[in-house]
Image (cartoon, grey):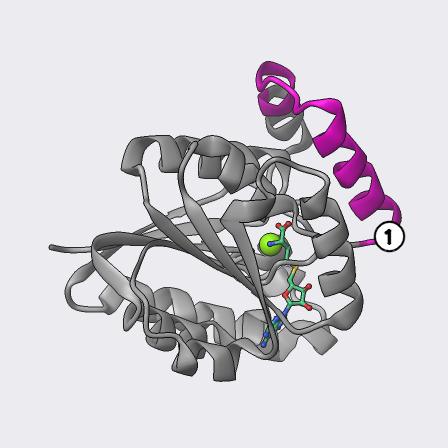
Amino acid sequence: MINENYIEEYIREITPGNNDFFKELEDYAEKNNIPIVEPEVAQLLKVLIKIQKPKKILEIGTAIGYSSLIMAESNDDVLITTIERNDEMIRLAKKNIAKTKYNSRIDILEGDANELLEELNEKYDFIFLDAAKGQYINFFDKSIKLLNEEGIIVSDNVLFKGMVASDKLVVRRKKTIVKRLRKYLQYINEKEGYISSTIPIGDGVSITYREG
Ligand code: SAH
Ligand code: MG
């Protein structure tokens, strides 16, 4: 958690909760330590999708399908392609997505994003980057080839428990990830033709807009 408790609690209090189906997924994720988007970030995704009205979304990092479903729910005809390499997560995501009316609009690509991103040749309006944090620059470079002009990339966990913003918080075994995330934030902020905003909600989120 990167915010003061009282800020996060207050924002959660004023944000309407999800329905029982989503709550079940949230409970499952919490019990099993699966890092799904935090409620404030889920809400941000919904609002961004309402504003931008993407026709096609690419997600990197499906886990149990929670954020895919949040995004599918935000817009009636958006198509989502989501990449996941972990077999158990793929199984759970399929099971969860099959229970919903969004089944036909969410396509899970099974395998490593590094390879799959190179094989894709469709274009997307909105990309949600939420997989291995140490590889964000790599994922970003591969993703922007698939991003339409005026498209956006949302990257999750960019402040990584606050460690990215303060050396005092960095624990030794996370040093490399933190270093890489700092490089990533610098990279997207300096990237020509793109404009980024980093928002301290959830675990830190960046929104990167590709100029038209
Ligand atoms: N977006 C989900 C959470 C994703 S957690 C949600 O908010 O609901 C990150 C997931 O990315 C994990 O399930 C992990 O297995 C997957 N992942 C990590 N690196 C990957 C890679 N290189 N290729 C494909 N999936 C990857
Ligand atoms: Mg995340």
Q: Quadrant of the C terminus?
A: bottom left
Q: Amino acid at mark 1?
A: Asn
For the image shown, how many numbered marks are present on the structure? 1
Give the dominant element type of the magenta stretch: helix, strand or loop. Answer: helix
The residue indicated by pointer 1 is: 32
Q: Nearer the viewer, residue 164 or 109?
A: 109
Tell me which corner region of the image, top left, top right, bottom left or bottom right, holds residue 182: bottom left
Q: Is residue 29 magenta?
A: yes
Q: Is residue 23 magenta?
A: yes
Label 1 secondary element: loop
Q: Nearer the viewer, residue 125 or 156?
A: 125
Asked whether residue 174 is in view, the answer is: yes
Spot occupied by residue 193 in the image (x, y as percentages of width and height): 15, 63
Q: Nearer the viewer, residue 115 or 187?
A: 115
Q: Quadrant of the N terminus?
A: top right
| Vertical side of 119 occupied by 105: above or below | above
Asked if residue 27 lies left or right of residue 186, the reply is: right
Mark 1 crowdedness (10 Å alpha carbons): few <14, some 14-19, many ≥20: few
Asked whether residue 2 is in view, the answer is: no
Please tell me which residue is depicted at 47% across the width and 49% down the height of the picture.
Answer: 205
Spot occupied by residue 112 in the image (x, y as percentages of width and height): 58, 79
Q: Nearer the viewer, residue 76 or 206?
A: 76
Instruction: Give the magenta-colored segment's residue range.
Output: 11-33
Tell me which corner region of the image, top left, top right, bottom left or bottom right, holds residue 185: bottom left
